[in-house]
Image (cartoon, rainbow, N blue to C red):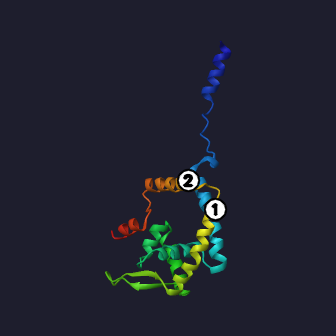
């Protein structure tokens, strides 16, 4: 009996084991790693050929899918990129005459951004290449798995209150 008591007291006095985190099963780690790899694969398409870095691409992509000019704040909000990073990208793209500033008709103190003709041509040339690359990356999934994946990403985005459509982004910009 004394052996049992000694064993019991040793277990009680031993520090409790901290929970261990297996990074390869931790969803935030997996999503971050996946995003970094996909971003890197896509950036190979626009960095070497067009001299764009990731923040510049985000500005180009956001302005390219819109029909109206928008603020740098809108781009930062949609892309979840820090405002100063977007500002540097805009400055660089303006120097290259890809982006231009236009006066906001509703508030003359504010400037909005839009693609120049050169920027629109670049966007139109680049998009098919990126869509092909996206399809290559997703080719390991069946058509149904791609639909399920998009749906599940949407659910996670919604649970985090992330903007999922340009209409949602436009509505939030109005406030």
User: Which sits earlier in the primary sequence, circle 1 or circle 2?
Assistant: 1
Please name which of the two marks, 1 or 2, marks the residue nearer to the observer.
Answer: 2
Q: Nearer the viewer, residue 21 or 124?
A: 124
Disc 2 residue crowd, few under 14, some 14–19, many 20+, Cα 10 Å: few
Residue shown at 50% from the left, 69% from the top: 82
| Mark 2 element type | helix
Q: Residue at x 61, y 58 (%)?
A: 34
The relative height of residue 103 versus residue 143 in the rendered view (above or below) is below
Residue located farthest toward the top when viewing the structure as drawn:
1
Residue at point 44%, 85% (across, down): 101
Q: Closer to the camera, 168 or 52?
A: 168
Residue that badge 1 annotates = 137
| Apparent side of residue 87 relative to residue 14 in the rendered image (left or right) | left
Q: Position of residue 8 (x, y in %)?
A: 62, 21
Instruction: Give the residue pinned by disc 2.
Output: 144
Which quadrant is the N terminus positioned in?
Answer: top right
Secondary structure at badge 1 equals helix
Does 97 appear above or below 166? below
Pick the residue in front: 152 or 18. Answer: 152
Mark 1, other Cα within 10 Å: few <14 / some 14–19 / many ≥20 = few
Task: Tell me what residue is drawn at x 60 percent, y 26 percent.
Answer: 12
Q: Any mark on residue 41, and which?
A: none
Q: Nearer the viewer, residue 114 or 14?
A: 114
**Disc 1 to disc 2, C-alpha distance:** 15 Å
């Amino acid at each position: 009996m004394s052996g049992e008591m000694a064993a019991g007291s040793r277990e009680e006095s031993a520090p409790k084991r901290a929970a261990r985190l297996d990074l390869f099963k931790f969803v935030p780690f997996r999503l971050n790693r996946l995003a970094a790899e996909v971003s890197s694969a896509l950036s190979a398409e626009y960095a070497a050929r067009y001299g764009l870095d990731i923040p510049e691409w985000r500005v180009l992509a956001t302005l390219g899918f819109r029909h109206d000019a928008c603020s740098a704040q809108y781009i930062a909000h949609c892309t979840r990129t820090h405002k100063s990073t977007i500002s540097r990208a805009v400055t660089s793209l303006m120097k290259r005459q890809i982006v231009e500033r236009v006066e906001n008709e509703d508030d003359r103190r504010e400037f909005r951004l839009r693609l120049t003709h050169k920027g629109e041509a670049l966007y139109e040339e680049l998009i098919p290449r990126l869509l092909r690359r996206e399809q290559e990356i997703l080719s390991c999934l069946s058509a149904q798995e791609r639909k399920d994946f998009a749906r599940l990403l949407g659910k996670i985005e919604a649970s985090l209150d992330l903007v999922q459509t340009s209409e949602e982004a436009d509505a939030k910009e109005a406030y």
